Image: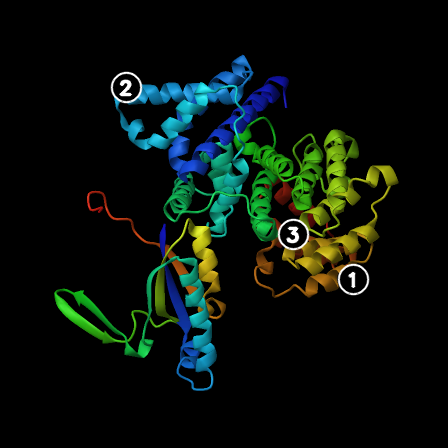
Amino acid sequence: MQYMLLLNETAEEYGRSNDPEQAPLYWGAWNAYIGALREAGVIINGDGLLGPHTATTVRIRDGQRLVQDGPFADTKEQLGGYFVIEVADLDAALEWAARAPCAANGSVEVRPVMPPPPGMAG
Amino acid sequence: MSEAAASRRAAELAARASYGRLVALLAARTRDIAAAEDALADAFAAALRHWPQRGVPANPDAWLMTAAKRTLLNAARHDNMRTAASGEVERRTINRLSDTEQAMIPDERLKLLFVCAHPAIDAAARTPLMLQTVLGLDAARIGAAFLIAPATMGQRLVRAKAKIRDAGLRFTVPEPEAMPERLGPVLDAVYAAYGAGWDGLGGDDAAVNGLGEEAIFLGRLLAELLPDAPEAKGLLALMLYCEARREARRDLSGRFVPLADQDARLWSAPMIAEAERLLTAASRAGQFGRYQCEAAIQSVHVQRPIEGSVNHRALLTLYDLLAAHAPTAGILVARAATLLQAGDPAAALAALDTLTGQERIATYQPYWATRAHALRATGATAAARNAFHKAAGLATDPAIRAWLLAEAAGTA
């Protein structure tokens, strides 16, 4: 099954990625994790995202286009990236989620990727 | 319980054992618990109708499979709704299994129990899920035991099953290194089933009687299937000690009788003997565990008729151990009650005072009942009466409420 790991980071953790002193440690952890995912051959795709300060949210309400600065919800943790992995079951996906560096201070949401609707396969 | 009721219950439990084995077998292959239940629903209903009257068949699993096969064939013939509900895999599995009726069916119930108490499943759904999938209880019966509307309970169960199927939870017995972490929630869920049955009013009415027997059934299953897990034995021992005293908890007119006043001749000696054996076997592993420790506390209580008094020092030692491990309100209040019974109401009050102001303690009935007794023992009668009234207002069991109000009235 395919699962998306939604990687949520705290602002503090995100800040480390740009801090000259802490960046090597920060990126070292992520690179090791990505290396392990690759080595296991489970990774389908994935990306990191630029910080929440770059986010813009769009809604259509009553035919009006509403554009708002900032992420969809102002929460303590923000989506910082994602991976889609292919593993046997949720338990295996949870094991990979627990290894993500942001699991230790942020969180990782694990969601099965929707299979194609009937008739759309292939 | 009358003889007829006892044999009806025996037939019912046999039907549940077979049903659970077959649901587990199908679900472990497809992850689709709801479809497995659908495939067996009619066969199980027939078993619950026939077995109590005609007796349990020689090979209950084969009986149930034959009945399920007949249903599936009929469904295929009529091409009705059930065909869609019962997936192809269930159909094939049942067909193949009934061709080798004498073959041993692998017991996958342990895997099913671990899936039901999986950390990815809503904690409030775990116990109901076990009761439904492993024992075939319906949502109304489970809802009644947990004081939840049947429709709400039904939704909770449907949601949990959908999560298991769609999110792809693993049907497996955890590796030894993951066992302590995974076994805890399984045992907790079984104990929660027992707790839901504990305050039942008795009699032959199963719906009122709660889930004690079902919980013990699950406890036995775990202790059998996990012979190397001392905590599984500890939990079963704990439930058996409590169950052994069920008859003694009410007097002839249905009034609540506290443990210290119970007539020990009403306790079930065979259950206590079994509990003692289990606890001894569990202790050989030399691993501390909450359930073994709680069972050991019960073991001290049942020594009263033999030793003539309760060994409060032993109880305190065990409560201290438990509190060091998990300082929950229940354990700390029980520890304070032991101080009181040991004849030290001042120490009991001091221990209760440390809990005052904690979250949920203001609405925790045992806290107020223990406080009331401690206050009365120190001569603070007005405050004691107040506390008894508070406890009575928080009680859910009518017999305990009546007893608390009588204690309040008798405190002058």
* Residue B264 appearing in the image: yes
Between B238 and B365, the residue placed more toward the observer is B238
Q: Residue furthest left?
A: A63
Quadrant housing the N terminus of chain B: top right
Residue type highlighted by circle 1: Ala
Q: Nearer the viewer, residue B64 or B99?
A: B99
Both labels 2 and 3 in a single chain: yes
Task: Look at label 2 and name its amino acid.
Answer: Arg
| Label of residue B366 in the image | 3
Choose between B345 and A42: the one closer to the eye. A42
Residue B168 at what x, y percent from top left? 40, 47
What is the chain identity of the residue bearing mark 1?
Answer: B
Q: In terms of secondary structure, where does tag 2 sit?
A: helix
SS state under label 3: helix
Query: Badge 3: few (under 14), some or many (20 or more) residues near its Cα, within 10 Å?
Result: some
In this rendering, the answer to whether A81 lies above or below B21 is: below
Q: Residues within 10 Å of mark 2 (few under 14, many from 20)?
A: few
- For label 1, the residue is B346
> Which of the chains bears the disc numbered 2?
B
Of marks 2 and 3, which one's residue comes earlier in the chain? 2
Amino acid marked by disc 3: Pro
Q: Are marks 1 and 2 in contact (CB under 8 Å)?
A: no
Chain assignment, label 3: B
At 60% from the left and 64% from the top, the residue drawn is: B358
What residue did someone put label 2 on? B77
Tell me, yes or no, whether the two marked residues, 1 and 3, touch with CB atoms within 8 Å.
no
The picture places residue B11, in percent across and down from the top left corner, at 56, 21
Query: How far is disc 2 from disc 3 in space, using C-alphas?
Result: 59 Å
2 vs 3, front mark: 2
